[in-house]
Amino acid sequence: MKDFKTILVAVDFSDSSINAFQLALSMARKFSAKLVLLHVINEPVDLRGFYVPHISFEKLEEEIEEGAHKMMDSFCRQNLTDYADHECLIVAGIPYEQIIDQASSKSADLIVLGTHGRTGLDHVLFGSTAEKVVRKSPFPVLTVRLEEES
Ligand code: AMP
């Protein structure tokens, strides 16, 4: 059986992704793997500098980044104090692209995702980020469905 050395789990703090995180953490424990927790700040590329003057956008971005770091710090403190081999990572960009890029730069053997994110929208198969990662990732992807999802 393949030995997982680095597992990347993508977390948008939705119930579905937290459920995926719990599975990723138990797998990391089982394989003594490094667990990389990734949150992507969804960048509103099309809106940048269009509706709002540049200066306001910079302030908004700063606040969003600060909020994301606070959320991630608190999540990691609550859930990972007893698992030292982990890294909590925040980047900005398009979630599915960043998930694949970060999996590549961290040499992840496995990507773990929930089937739905914060919008809870039902796409054709599952959430669009999950769908795109499954379609485009050169690395194995494990999607985890929450029990109460229909
Ligand atoms: P979605 O396609 O948005 O319904 O989300 C499906 C799964 O992709 C979520 O359960 C997360 O595991 C992951 N995901 C979605 N958006 C993000 C994000 N901004 N940062 C990290 N992971 C994400």
Image (spheres, grey):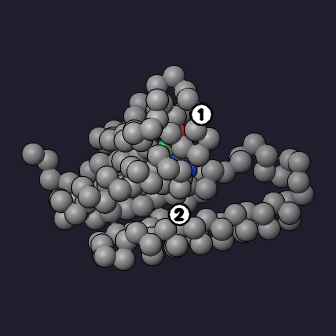
Q: Which numbered disc, 2 or 1, marks the residue that appears first in the sequence?
A: 2
Question: Residue 65, position in %: x, y?
Answer: 65, 66
**Judging from the image, what secondary structure is the residue with disc 2 in?**
strand
> Which residue is depicted at the point 66% across and 71% down?
66
> Which residue is depicted at the point 15% across and 53% down?
3
CA separation in Å, label 2 and label 1: 23 Å
Q: Left or right: where does residue 89 sit relative to residue 66?
A: left
Q: Nearer the viewer, residue 116 or 9?
A: 116
Q: In the rendered structure, which amino acid carries the disc numbered 2?
A: Ile
> Which residue is depicted at the point 44% across and 38% down?
148
Q: In the rendered structure, which amino acid carries the disc numbered 1?
A: Leu
Q: Left or right: where does residue 23 sit relative to residue 16?
A: left
Question: Is the residue at mark 1 in contact range of ligand 1, meaning its CB lies under 8 Å from it?
Answer: yes
In the image, is residue 30 above or below residue 93?
below
Q: Nearer the viewer, residue 58 or 35?
A: 35
Residue holding disc 2:
90
Q: Quadrant of residue 144?
A: top left
Which circle marks residue 150 in the picture? Answer: none
**Judging from the image, what secondary structure is the residue with disc 1 in?**
loop
Tell which tag, 2 or 1, sits nearer the viewer.
Answer: 1
Local crowd size for mark 1, using a 10 Å CA cut-off: few (<14), some (14–19), many (≥20): few
Local crowd size for mark 2, using a 10 Å CA cut-off: few (<14), some (14–19), many (≥20): some
Residue holding disc 1:
121
Farthest residue toward the top?
124
Question: Is the residue at mark 2 in contact range of ligand 1, meaning its CB lies under 8 Å from it?
Answer: no
